């Protein structure tokens, strides 16, 4: 295939995805559901953070989880063990979730009216950046074991995320992890990115993450109240 043809095919795929993502976004809004798309490299701790968050928040509002992995339903089982509903999507050869997959999985969840949908994307710091799933925003989970320079090496993901959760902060002392440098690199790519340090192991920083979620919910509700005519 010529380079022009490849670019055209990519445009068609992303154009179709964007339409389906808009449909998802309308459905989430109609159900008053706040959706987050969690992205990271494999093993950064997305599922561990979600297990904690779902356990801590599920008595406050409805929560559902869509889990993306190439194979296995391990992560959906980890979420279900908390008592919250989770749908596993296996992408097979695919390396990211797309809006069609999320739309279908959302249909299979119970009604989350007034609640939160967490979408755990396939562990991959590259192409999930390009695929809108209809989420309110992307949250990039970056862990202290990955090396401070990853925001510079994989800038797209940090550029499109609203929040960077720096996980495994409990390991920072053993790793000589340079927090200030990591934040500086992330803000070089995305000056507006918000940053929270957390540990899914010890629970450090999770209260601040939950406040952030509540703040997003309040923002979404103010925005939709403004959008209602009259
Ligand atoms: N020390 C430490 N280990 C963690 C933390 N969060 C996750 N892990 C470990 O990191 C590994 C990958 O976690 P997982 O949640 O499966 O990552 P995912 O691939 O992003 O979903 C597991 O062995 C977790 O126990 C953390 O905050 N601190
Ligand atoms: Mg996982
Ligand atoms: Zn991909």
Image: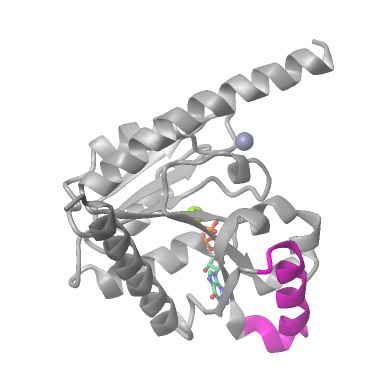
Q: Per the image, is 186 magenta? A: yes
Which coloring applies here? one colour
Which quadrant of the rendered structure holds the N terminus? top right
Q: Quadrant of residue 180?
A: bottom right
Q: Is residue 175 above or below residue 27?
A: below
Q: Is residue 132 left or right of residue 217?
A: right
Looking at the rendering, the stretch of residues picked out in magenta corresponds to 171-191
Residue 25, percent from left and from top: 35, 42
Q: Per the image, is 116 magenta? A: no
Residue 81 in view in this figure: no
Q: Is residue 40 left or right of residue 51?
A: right
Q: Residue at x 57, y 23 (%)?
A: 13
Q: Is residue 196 above or below residue 150?
A: below
Q: Quadrant of residue 222?
A: bottom left
Residue 11, percent from left and from top: 64, 24
Q: Residue furthest front?
A: 230
Viewer-side residue, 220 vs 183 = 220
Residue 4, percent from left and from top: 79, 16
């Amino acid at each position: 295939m010529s380079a022009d043809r490849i670019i055209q095919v990519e445009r068609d795929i992303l154009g179709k995805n964007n339409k389906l993502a808009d449909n998802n976004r309308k459905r989430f809004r109609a159900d008053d559901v706040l959706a987050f798309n969690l992205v990271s490299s494999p093993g950064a701790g997305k599922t561990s953070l979600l297990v904690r968050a779902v356990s801590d928040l599920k008595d406050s509002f409805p929560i559902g989880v869509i889990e993306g992995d190439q194979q296995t339903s391990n992560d959906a089982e980890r979420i279900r063990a908390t008592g919250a509903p989770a749908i596993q999507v296996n992408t097979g050869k695919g390396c990211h979730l797309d809006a069609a997959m999320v739309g279908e999985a959302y249909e299979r969840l119970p009604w989350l009216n007034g609640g939160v949908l967490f979408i755990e994307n396939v562990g991959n710091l590259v192409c999930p950046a390009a695929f809108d799933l209809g989420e309110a925003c992307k949250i990039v989970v970056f862990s202290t074991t990955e090396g401070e320079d990853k925001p510079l090496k994989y800038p797209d993901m940090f550029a499109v995320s609203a929040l960077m959760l720096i996980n495994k902060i409990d390991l920072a002392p053993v790793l000589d992890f340079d927090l200030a440098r990591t934040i500086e690199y992330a803000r070089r790519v995305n000056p507006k990115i918000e940053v929270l340090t957390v540990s899914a192991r010890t629970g450090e920083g999770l209260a601040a993450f939950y406040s952030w979620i509540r703040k997003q919910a309040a923002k979404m509700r103010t925005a939709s109240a403004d959008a209602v005519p009259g």
